[in-house]
Amino acid sequence: MRSILAAGLTALMLAALPGAAAVTVKKSEYAKLPDGAVTMFTVTNAKGMEAKIITWGGVLVSLKTPDRKGTLADVVHGHDSLGDYRADTGTYFGALVGRYANRIGGAKFQLDGKTYKLPVNDGANGLHGGTLGFDKRNWSGREVPGGVELSYTSKDGEEGYPGTLKTIVTYTLTEENALRIHYTATTDKATVVNMTNHTYWNLRGEGDILNHLVTINADKYTPVDTGLIPTGELKDVTGTPFDFRKPMAPGARIKQADEQLKRGNGYDHNWVLNRTGKGLELAGRVEETTTGRVLEVFTDQPGVQFYTGNFLNGSVKGKGGKPMNQRTALCLETQHYPDSPNKPTFPTTTLKPGEKYDTTTEFRFSVK
Ligand code: GLA
């Protein structure tokens, strides 16, 4: 009797613990490769929220989350097949981006007196880890409580970067409707690391994002040159179309005659997050008023790239073969500032042997 009572109590206590209730993880084959397979992990919580992650590029393929009536919709851009993900070299839909996400000016940097040259894949610059960055690799995947752990070892010299980098990224879904991404990496030679997830969000699940209400917790941003490389200045957002400290529709000012908006073809800039400590703090919030879906992004990173899908022009097809048009999604890529390896005044992205790159970003969903 006692033991039955005790077991019942334990079950009750477990159920009351946040995140301890049943998040289920299902594994299936997504596609075959000549030397293995791409695995899909379907992670579901008791509220019906569901995330699908594949080992190819660590891509978040779909994320279903309820609106204020409880109706689920897929709120991320993606493709229907591995072939489409492989053929798409420009969008980075849902992918884990590395070794260095965002741009490195002139596609080169110096470390300990040596110059490292990277693939030139964006004008004169290096973008998103190179031609075969982390988004174009098949990671090893295994189920962990509440999610999936992905690992990838990037060889010394791969895509021009020094040092063998052992990377582990864990996606977990919580019972409170948060998708947590935890990144770690270690190296055997000094290198630079800046990883992110490149999900394209559309909280309505269709149409454009010009009326989503966006808040970015930042007093400053990093203005860019014509190649979208930060000039080095941390510019006050006050009185500019970059002031998102109060909820604002991206569409409200995106067409303003502003030199920075012109350079980015819209919003495609890094914001300098207001931070008070080292832990997870609010980077941004997105609200979609017709469905009531709200996304809050929490991170320990110093910056966030807010990108309004300016380069989408319908030529890339998404799920169901639908043309992905301009501004049909927005990205909030938590990260270090672009071109940090060439900007001594920016927080450092150097990782040395014996150190651990360790960072977390959480995408928290709710309704209003
Ligand atoms: C980032 C960049 C953009 C673009 C997208 C991918 O957000 O800042 O300029 O390259 O990735 O298309």
Image: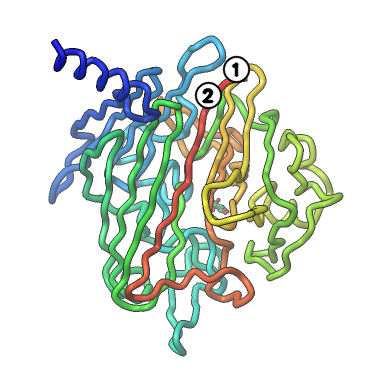
> Which of the numbered marks, if any, corresponds to residue 205?
2
Position of 243 relative to 349 (above/below):
above
Task: Decide if ligand 1 comes within 8 Å of the CB at mark 2.
Answer: no
Circles 2 and 1, Cβ within 8 Å, touching? The answer is: yes
Looking at the picture, how far across and down is residue 259, in whole percent?
Answer: 79, 57
Q: Residue at x 79, y 47 (%)?
A: 241
Q: Quadrant of the C terminus?
A: top right
Q: Quadrant of the N terminus?
A: top left
Q: Is residue 109 left or right of residue 255?
A: left
Q: Is residue 249 left or right of residue 279?
A: right
First reached walking from the N terminus: tag 2 or tag 1: 2
Looking at the picture, how far across and down is residue 76, in whole percent?
Answer: 47, 32
Looking at the picture, how far across and down is residue 284, in whole percent?
Answer: 62, 41
Q: Residue at x 55, y 40 (%)?
A: 297
Asked which secondary structure carries label 1, the reply is loop
Q: Residue at x 69, y 31 (%)?
A: 213
Q: Work out how far the residue at label 2 is from the one at label 1, CA to CA, in angstroms.
A: 9 Å
**Relative to the observer, which residue lies in front, 55 or 146?**
146
Disc 1 crowd rating (10 Å Cα; few below 14, some 14-19, many 20+) is some
Q: Residue at x 27, y 26 (%)?
A: 24
Residue 163 location, quadrant: bottom left
Disc 2 crowd rating (10 Å Cα; few below 14, some 14-19, many 20+) is some
Name which residue type carries label 1: Thr
Name which residue type carries label 2: Gly
Position of 103 relative to 18 (above/below):
below
Looking at the picture, how far across and down is residue 189, in whole percent?
Answer: 33, 78
The residue that label 1 is drawn on is: 291
For this orientation, the residue located farthest to the bottom is 113
Residue 21 location, quadrant: top left
